[in-house]
Image (cartoon, rainbow, N blue to C red):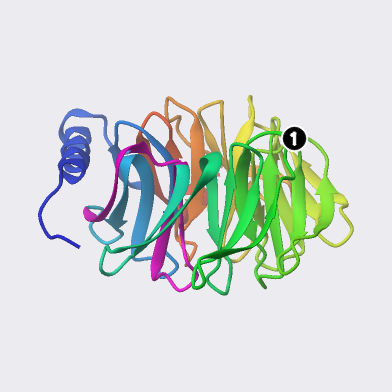
Amino acid sequence: MKNNVTVSMLIALALAFAWAVGGAALPTGAVAAWKLPWLSDATFSPDGRYLAVATTSAVLLYGTETWEVSREFPVPGWNVFSVAFSSDGRLVAAGVVGEVRVWDVATGDLLHTVAGPFGTVRAVAFDHEGNLAYGASDGSLHLWDLARAQPLWVRIPHTVPVRAIVFSPDGTQMASTGMDRAILWDTATGEILRTLPGRAWDVVFTPDGYFVVVGWGKLVRLWDTAVGFLYREMWGHESCVVAVAVSPDGTLLASGSLDEAARLWDPDGGTYLSVLPSHGGVVGAVGFSPDGSLLVTASDNGTVFVWDVATLVGKR
């Protein structure tokens, strides 16, 4: 990767500085905050060293010790709609219009470009073997062998854009969502194991793999993965839930919504523990750090907050 400072990095640093000197003080529990022109996704690296943010013309990697931009993966002329790390943290993938790009995190080299006539790629994920899964606006779902540069399987299960893809902890299952339904898949064969009814924005497996958490309407729903039983519904948001996450130990859920708020939940009791201050825009991405100590919430208006989870839970 080149060591020169890029325009995107300068913009990110300038906006973070403007927040610090001209904006309000950080809300209680926040350890970092900044504002970009626009963003769509944010996720921590498996080792917790980086926070990747999908934004205009680039994926930006923020170091979690300084919260400064330490890496940039450029996508000139395009918005980045989705971002994901491989399970070993060596690769980062980004979904844009008509293609997926994969870089080496350490060197910044662009290793793979997977292109096709499938529209905008709004969901990307890596399986445990390093294969790339992605879902597009034409409703198609792909599992791609990066080493051989060929598809393992392709399905068109959704009648609307694919919004999310995630793998189970043991890698044997995959879940996908669209605004039509959520689907559980056999990763190896690409066969549908179970269909969960209702419009679904986002999905994530619990750490034990027994449940999937789905954002559906104003609800956060927990479904049993073995039999498709609706285990729990959690109410509280005033508009559609578009982002969900589970802490690494499974004791907390986080959700983001069109109501511009993020919430923390107790999945066992089904009650919310904390309502985070409004982003002033749709909270379209939430995620826990690998050790569970931090929570990121991000909005399409470009605001990013990183929260200390212990402080948030202690506020209840």
**Which image quadrant: the C terminus?**
top right
Looking at this view, is 125 or 262 the one in front?
A: 125
Which residue is situated farthest in the left direction here? 4
Q: Position of residue 291 (x, y in %)?
A: 47, 67
Q: Quadrant of residue 250?
A: bottom right
Q: Residue at x 69, y 60 (%)?
A: 174
**Residue 50 visible to the viewer:** yes
Q: Please report the bounds of the magenta region as a residue range.
A: 69-97
Residue at which label 1 appears: 180
* Amino acid of disc 1: Asp
Q: Nearer the viewer, residue 150 or 263?
A: 150
Q: Residue at x 10, y 55 (%)?
A: 4
- Residue 275, above or below 123: above
Where residue 117 appears, x then y in whole percent?
A: 54, 41
Q: Main secondary structure of the magenta part?
A: strand
Q: Quadrant of residue 225?
A: bottom right
Residue drawn at x 28%, y 39% is 34
In the rendered image, is residue 254 in sight?
no
